[in-house]
Amino acid sequence: MFAKTAHSHFPRRLIAVLTGALLITGAIPPIIAHAEDTFECYNGGLTTKAQAVAYGAVNSTWAGYFDTARSRWANAGVGASFAKISFATSSITAGRYSDSWFGIYMPHGSYYSIKVNIRSLDAKTSNASTFALWSKSTSTHELGHALRLPDNPPTTKTSLMSHSRDRSKVGSPTAYDKANVKYCLGGLPTRTGSTVGATEVMSADYPTYDSLADAMSAADVVVRASLVRSVASVLMPDLSTNTGDARTNPQYGVRPTAKDLQDLRVPVTVSTVQVSETLKGSLKPGQDIKISQLGGQLDGVQYREASTTLLANASGDEYLLLLRKRNDGVYEMIGADSGWVVQRGRLTSLNGQSTNAPFGATSLPILSRAIDPAR
């Protein structure tokens, strides 16, 4: 069980704002770029462009998607390469997880593990062709984290690393991404292995919503609730090897090894909350529900998802949450931080570091009207 603690900051950001005179922060060599380019680096990536990665328990269809992702980086012209080596420590795999994220990059010090979520990709695409495009885009995106690229970089330019990208069209590193790799992979110390008691920051590729109305439509329930308790847990995918087909079940016809099963694990925190009011859905006041969020302890190491505020670490005592109900009856937020702290009818972000509430909803009346315009 977790007690509430102060929300920790995003890992050290290295930002270069290139104006008329080039300004560099951190021990990073300068690159040639447009005057308006701004870059950030993700500290969970490795410090070399030439890397080795093993494929987890996936069939030939998914091995082909991963091959495409590796080749896109090899052909990006930045000197990056991901050699497929069966005994490599770093890994990339896929599974049918019950959550709605598309992919997760988990750093483990000197290596990493990537998981791609087929269930979410299948739910968001309407045909096999689009599914393949999204799957390849997600796989290439996750490998970008190994090159120190962050999610949602500070640019208006098209980026493979943006959660709001069109995954049907943006599947390869863009000009901005290539410049960002050149910026980030220089002058940084080599990462060492994770140690017990350490904290690693993983990065998840989440669905995005264009407006508050879209977010409300995506939610199965919208509730006001208070935290009862939180416990660490582990999320595993559906490991059936004989259902579905090779496209929608990456383990179809494959027998996972003990190492494969270890690489498929995702640390989560499951919080029990008590509902005080339901704005959408049929939950009753006083009812307890469970909410799963990315992040928690695994093998003695604490993992935090970069854009997720665990309810155990949230800044207030009452929250307003946009939730999706999973098939197992557990709920999840529809996005990384699709919730608010409620204080005297005002809404603020869960992390307490910003007064900007998600989707611009700053009060309960604004949010209520997004659910029902007649309110």
Image (spheres, helix red, strand yellow):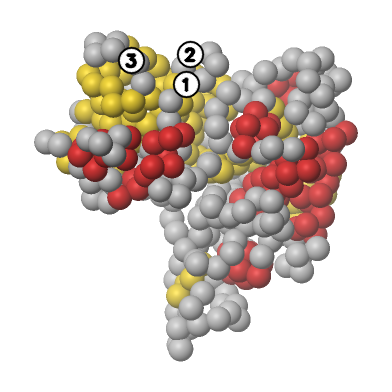
Name the residue at the left extreme.
Answer: 344
- Taking the spot 69% from the left edge, 61% from the top edge, the residue there is 173
- Nearest the viewer among 326 and 239 is 326
Residue 157 position (above or below residue 318): below
Amino acid type, residue under disc 3 in the picture: Leu
- Taking the spot 65% from the left edge, 22% from the top edge, the residue there is 237
- Taking the spot 46% from the left edge, 88% from the top edge, the residue there is 20
Q: Dividing the picture into quarters, in which one does residue 293 lie?
A: top left
- Nearest the viewer among 370 and 251 is 370
Q: Kindly indicate whether the residue at mark 2 contacts the one at mark 1 (C-beta within 8 angstroms).
A: yes
- Residue bearing mark 2: 329
- Residue bearing mark 1: 325
The label nearer to you, 3 versus 2, is 3
**In the rendered view of the protein, which quadrant contains the N terminus?**
top left
Query: Which of the two labelled residues, at mark 1 and mark 3, occupies the earlier sequence position?
Result: 3
State left or right for residue 372 relative to residue 186: left
User: How far across and down, in percent of the image, does residue 361 sit?
Assistant: 28, 45
Q: Secondary structure at mark 1?
A: strand
For residue 219, say whether it is visible.
yes
In the picture, the disc for residue 283 is 3
Mark 1–mark 3 Cα distance, whole angstroms, equals 12 Å
Residue neighbourhood size for the residue with mark 2, other residues' Cα within 10 Å, grouped as few (<14), some (14–19), many (≥20): few
For residue 46, say whether it is visible.
no
Residue neighbourhood size for the residue with mark 3, other residues' Cα within 10 Å, grouped as few (<14), some (14–19), many (≥20): some
Q: Kindly indicate whether the residue at mark 3 contacts the one at mark 1 (C-beta within 8 angstroms).
A: no
Q: Dividing the picture into quarters, in which one does residue 221 lie?
A: top left
